[in-house]
Image (cartoon, rainbow, N blue to C red):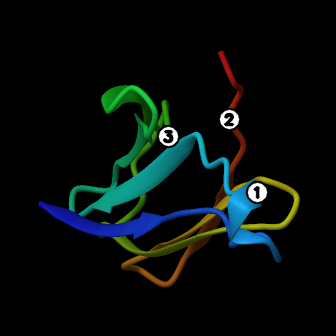
Amino acid sequence: MLTLLALPPLPPDPRELQDEYMYVGTTSGDVLQVSLSQHLFKNAGPSKTRIPKGVISNAIAPTGELVIGGGDGSVSVLVGTDE
Protein backbone atom coordinates (compact mmCIF):
# COMPACT_ATOMS: atom_id res chain seq x y z
CA MET A 1 0.00 0.00 0.00
CA LEU A 2 1.29 3.47 -0.87
CA THR A 3 1.05 6.00 1.91
CA LEU A 4 2.68 9.30 0.95
CA LEU A 5 4.36 11.16 -1.81
CA ALA A 6 6.80 14.05 -1.80
CA LEU A 7 7.49 16.59 -4.49
CA PRO A 8 10.11 19.35 -4.35
CA PRO A 9 8.84 22.75 -3.13
CA LEU A 10 7.28 24.97 -5.77
CA PRO A 11 9.55 27.69 -7.20
CA PRO A 12 8.47 31.33 -6.83
CA ASP A 13 7.51 31.36 -10.52
CA PRO A 14 5.37 28.30 -11.43
CA ARG A 15 6.69 28.50 -15.02
CA GLU A 16 10.05 27.35 -13.62
CA LEU A 17 8.52 24.09 -12.38
CA GLN A 18 10.76 21.27 -13.61
CA ASP A 19 10.21 18.37 -11.24
CA GLU A 20 11.84 15.21 -12.53
CA TYR A 21 10.75 12.72 -9.87
CA MET A 22 8.19 12.07 -7.19
CA TYR A 23 8.90 9.93 -4.14
CA VAL A 24 6.32 7.57 -2.67
CA GLY A 25 6.53 5.89 0.74
CA THR A 26 4.95 2.51 1.47
CA THR A 27 3.60 0.84 4.58
CA SER A 28 6.25 -1.86 4.14
CA GLY A 29 9.04 0.72 4.56
CA ASP A 30 10.14 1.19 0.97
CA VAL A 31 10.57 4.50 -0.84
CA LEU A 32 9.88 4.51 -4.57
CA GLN A 33 11.23 7.03 -7.08
CA VAL A 34 8.99 7.64 -10.10
CA SER A 35 9.94 9.66 -13.19
CA LEU A 36 7.31 12.33 -13.88
CA SER A 37 8.37 12.93 -17.49
CA GLN A 38 8.48 9.26 -18.51
CA HIS A 39 5.78 8.01 -16.11
CA LEU A 40 8.03 5.12 -15.08
CA PHE A 41 9.28 3.56 -11.86
CA LYS A 42 12.99 4.45 -11.56
CA ASN A 43 14.33 3.25 -8.22
CA ALA A 44 13.48 1.84 -4.79
CA GLY A 45 15.24 2.14 -1.48
CA PRO A 46 16.69 2.21 1.02
CA SER A 47 18.88 -0.56 -0.36
CA LYS A 48 20.00 -2.25 2.88
CA THR A 49 17.16 -1.91 5.37
CA ARG A 50 13.57 -0.75 5.11
CA ILE A 51 12.14 2.14 7.12
CA PRO A 52 10.96 0.61 10.43
CA LYS A 53 7.16 0.18 10.68
CA GLY A 54 6.56 1.88 7.31
CA VAL A 55 6.95 5.37 5.93
CA ILE A 56 4.79 7.81 7.88
CA SER A 57 6.05 11.09 6.40
CA ASN A 58 8.49 12.33 3.81
CA ALA A 59 9.79 15.65 2.54
CA ILE A 60 12.48 16.92 0.23
CA ALA A 61 15.04 19.16 1.97
CA PRO A 62 16.20 22.34 0.18
CA THR A 63 19.54 20.59 -0.39
CA GLY A 64 17.79 17.74 -2.26
CA GLU A 65 17.97 14.96 0.33
CA LEU A 66 14.83 12.98 1.03
CA VAL A 67 13.88 13.08 4.73
CA ILE A 68 11.78 10.09 5.81
CA GLY A 69 9.81 9.59 9.02
CA GLY A 70 9.36 5.98 10.11
CA GLY A 71 6.43 4.48 12.00
CA ASP A 72 8.75 3.76 14.95
CA GLY A 73 9.61 7.47 15.37
CA SER A 74 12.89 7.28 13.48
CA VAL A 75 14.06 9.87 10.95
CA SER A 76 16.19 8.85 7.99
CA VAL A 77 17.90 10.93 5.32
CA LEU A 78 18.19 9.34 1.89
CA VAL A 79 20.58 10.70 -0.70
CA GLY A 80 20.17 9.45 -4.25
CA THR A 81 22.04 9.83 -7.48
CA ASP A 82 20.61 10.97 -10.78
CA GLU A 83 21.17 8.62 -13.68
Task: Note whether 60 is above or below 57 in the view shown.
Answer: above
Circle on res. 80: 2
Q: Which mark is residue 16?
A: 1
Q: Are marks 2 and 1 in contact (CB under 8 Å)?
A: no
Q: Compare marks 1 and 3 and give the one earlier in the sequence.
A: 1
User: What separation in Å lies between label 2 and label 1 (alpha carbons)?
Assistant: 23 Å
Q: Position of residue 75 (x, y in %)?
A: 61, 73
Q: CA distance from mark 1 to mark 3?
A: 30 Å
Q: Residue at x 69, y 72 (%)?
A: 10
Q: Position of residue 73 (x, y in %)?
A: 49, 84
Q: Which circle, 1 or 3, is nearer the viewer?
A: 1
Q: Residue at x 49, y 33 (%)?
A: 48
Residue that sits furthest to the front in the current view: 15
Going by the numbered disc 1, the residue's amino acid type is Glu
Label 1–label 3 contact, CB within 8 A = no
Precedes in sequence: disc 2 or disc 1: 1
Q: Is residue 72 above or below residue 5?
A: below
Q: Secondary structure at mark 2?
A: loop
Q: Amino acid at mark 2?
A: Gly
Which residue, as the protein is rendered here, is positioned at the far top?
83
Give x and y (percent) for residue 9: 69, 72
Q: Tag 3, which secondary structure? A: loop
Whole-percent x, y for residue 82 in the image: 69, 24
Viewer-closest of 15 and 20: 15
Residue depth check, mark 2 versus mark 1: number of the one nearer the observer: 1
Residue at position x 84%, y 66% from top? 62
Nearest the camera: 64 or 40?
40
Q: Which residue is mark 3?
A: 46
Q: Quadrant of residue 27?
A: bottom left
Give the CA distance from mark 3 to mark 2.
10 Å
